[in-house]
Image (cartoon, grey):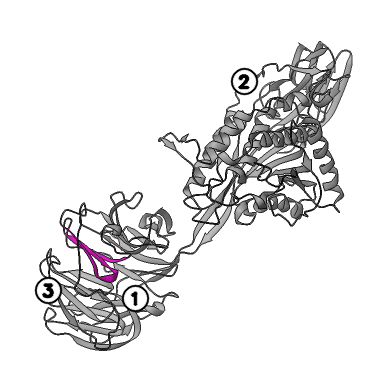
Amino acid sequence: MATIFKGLILKFSRPDAFQLPVRIFVIHLIAFIFLSSGLKGQSCTICQLTGRIDSGNIAEIIKCLSGEDPIDTGDGLVSINTRYAFSPQKAIATDYLMDLATSYGYSPFIHSFILKVDRPDLTGIAVSPGADTVWVGSMDGDIFISLRDNGWSSFDRLSGLDGRVNELVLSGGGRLWAACKAIGGGWGKIFSSDDGGVTWEMKKDGGETDFSSLNTISFWDEQWGFAAGDHGAFLNTSDGGESWWTEAIPLPYNINGSTALGPFHYLIVTDAGYLFESTDRGFSWSSTSLSPAMARLTDIDFVDEVHGVIVGSGVVFYTSDGGTTWDETAHPAELRCVEMIDSINVVASGGGGEVWISEDGGASWVSLENGCIGTEPVWRFSMDSGGGMWTAGGNEILRVEPGWPAVEDCRSYIVADTIRGSNIVFRKEGMKEPEHRVVLCGHYDSINRETDPLVCAPGADDNASGTACVLECARILSDAWLDRTVEFVLFDGEELGLIGSSAFAAEADTHAIYDALINLDMVGNDYGGTGTALLGAVEDSQDSTLAGILLRCSEDYTLQYTLDWSYRMTHNQPTSDQLSFKEVVDMPVACIIESGYRDNPHYHNCSDLFEFVNMDYIADVARTALSAVAELAGYGLAPAADLVLHQNYPNPFSSFTRVTFEIPREMDVRLSVHDVTGRELALLINDRVDADRYLYIWNGRNDAGSDLSSGVYFIRLKAGGETKSVKAVILH
């Protein structure tokens, strides 16, 4: 025999800035059948919940998160091959999960936290012709930008390149160029950007000509340019960088600096103290050994066809006859870069962060006055059209205003790229005790400790499986009546040391009462053969109580697999997100995890794919979690036996409060608000209603639509000859 009960009707009075008329939203009736006999002999409504677990839905989520199935981003289909915390693809996963929670009827939000403060090693730097934009590159391939319009207040990460940025330059027409070195093996590359560094196109890959690093790039005009790098690599273009002709200098020295005196006339300097010169676009070269001691030469610049300067390790060479002869002078610093302002004024910088000035064409040098010294060695600098100078090195940028050798102004900027993580949070509000919360969580980031996690970390088991279970439970509970609030959280940064959950727990809502937390981490298979492990601390009475609930739910509602609650592991092993809450919030916690995760050959590996997960196993974990959460949150739809008016929540309140009441049978209902004298101020409901539970959201206004002032009021429920009332306090 089966009995059918109706679901709840939600009625909302909606507060807003425009004082719109009260709107009544009626949620469709939801019928649940209470079976007299059910799964494993259970007779309860929760059996109906667990019966709604859809393995196909769980599988679809795991496939999308692990790259098995592509997802539609709006800009095309994309496969998520990694959810590593620092991967751009993790953001795609975040958006996918947010959209999924929204489709279930929730209002998810991002809890943002600092994942990492990256202090980059800055390298190449370029300044726009009008000195209104500065770009700087880093050894990690990041491109940062700052604008004069914002007062140079910050250098923000704009984009990233596949290679260490050794030099940034602007060619004619405003195109931005980057010469790069391979990171962790591979080939050097040339990139260009036509939109100010927002997007980049690779123009040349060193794999075709076997060079690993390009250290310098130079353009004579919009069409003619060249790049050079390690092992004598030399590349030439005559069509604005669309194609590159490659050759090598006669000796395989590393090329560090270059300059062009015309579209065919190039000069380069090398590690071994050599100057190479070509007047035919690099088809042939002449060489000069400037340093018998083979001192490292780092940069070269000419202001015209006759005046030039070369700098290097503790040495400077200068010429006034076009390089026919070179004079040498010692220098106390390790100089890396040089630029001639005119035929006699020269600027150089490098090790120690100092800026050096020569007023005699390079023969003698003095340190810049007014103490304009950076704290980091300078990698590169760039001059703007007004004579100002920008240096880059370490994570520091110096902006030096003209006035050589005196300085009108010198500013230092520290570049720190703050990378933020994204916890995903959404809630099913409780109807009777919404301040009480039950947390169901899992982490959605992944890692690969065998190869590059930025490229491949599908994480089907760890932890797309737990994430999918959390979402499936949320889908089923979205239309349920719960006495207490269920908070669903998908954590970021777990694989980097519980960063996301630690930040979330540290900022836990102080007005909430956390009753329990269940964490689902790596629930994709049973490699240990002993069932699913339930982790907590045996000596903790709170955990033991929660464990008992989970054990019973596992026995009552699963189809094949049950939990193995052996307490063989404590809070500290293995580490997962429940630990963050145990250390901050005094609440019972538990983690469900496959007992043999250490025996899983795909653990933290690129092979953690959907084909290796067990959907029957995952579905039983979802049934266990769903039934436990439903019990803890007070799930049920039976009508009340008596007329009940619950205390409004929140109370006190300023903009709105929830009023919940229960009607035992069909009757006329009058819900109203009164002041302390008994005068009626607002009539909220005056209608005949069925037996059910009701929620009314009151916006704190009277019948005229005006906000009531701060004070004490009484919410009164009259029905069936009975009157119930609760005291409500408004605080503005």
Residue 513: image tag = none
* Residue 407: mark: 1
Q: Which numbered marker is on residue 305?
A: 3
Which image quadrant is residue 648 in? top right
Towards the viewer: 488 or 466: 466
> Does residue 219 appear to the left or right of 529 in the view shown?
left
Image vertical order of residue 335 relative to residue 579, above or below: below
Question: Residue 391 in the image: x percent, y percent?
Answer: 36, 70
Give the image location of residue 527, x and y in percent. Answer: 67, 46
Q: Tell me residue 436's x, y (percent).
A: 78, 38
Between marks 3 and 2 in the image, the one whose residue lies nearer the viewer: 3
Q: Which stretch did the figure color magenta?
A: 210-238
Residue depth check, mark 3 versus mark 1: number of the one nearer the observer: 3
Q: Are marks 2 and 1 in contact (CB under 8 Å)?
A: no
Q: Is residue 548 above or below residue 86?
A: above
Residue 646 drawn in magenta: no
To which residue does mark 2 refer?
Answer: 21
Which mark is first along the chain, 1 or 3?
A: 3
Tell me the quadrant of the picture where the N terminus can be found.
Answer: top right
Q: Residue at x 37, y 67 (%)?
A: 123
Q: CA distance from mark 3 to mark 2?
A: 80 Å
Q: Secondary structure at mark 3?
A: loop
Residue 712 can be seen in this image: no
Is residue 287 something one can see in this rendering?
yes
Disc 3 crowd rating (10 Å Cα; few below 14, some 14-19, many 20+) is few
Q: Amino acid at mark 3?
A: Glu
Answer whether labels 3 and 2 touch (C-beta < 8 Å).
no
Front residue of this view, candidates 692 and 459: 459
Q: Is residue 137 left or right of residue 624?
A: left
Query: Real-space Cα distance between discs 3 and 1?
Result: 29 Å
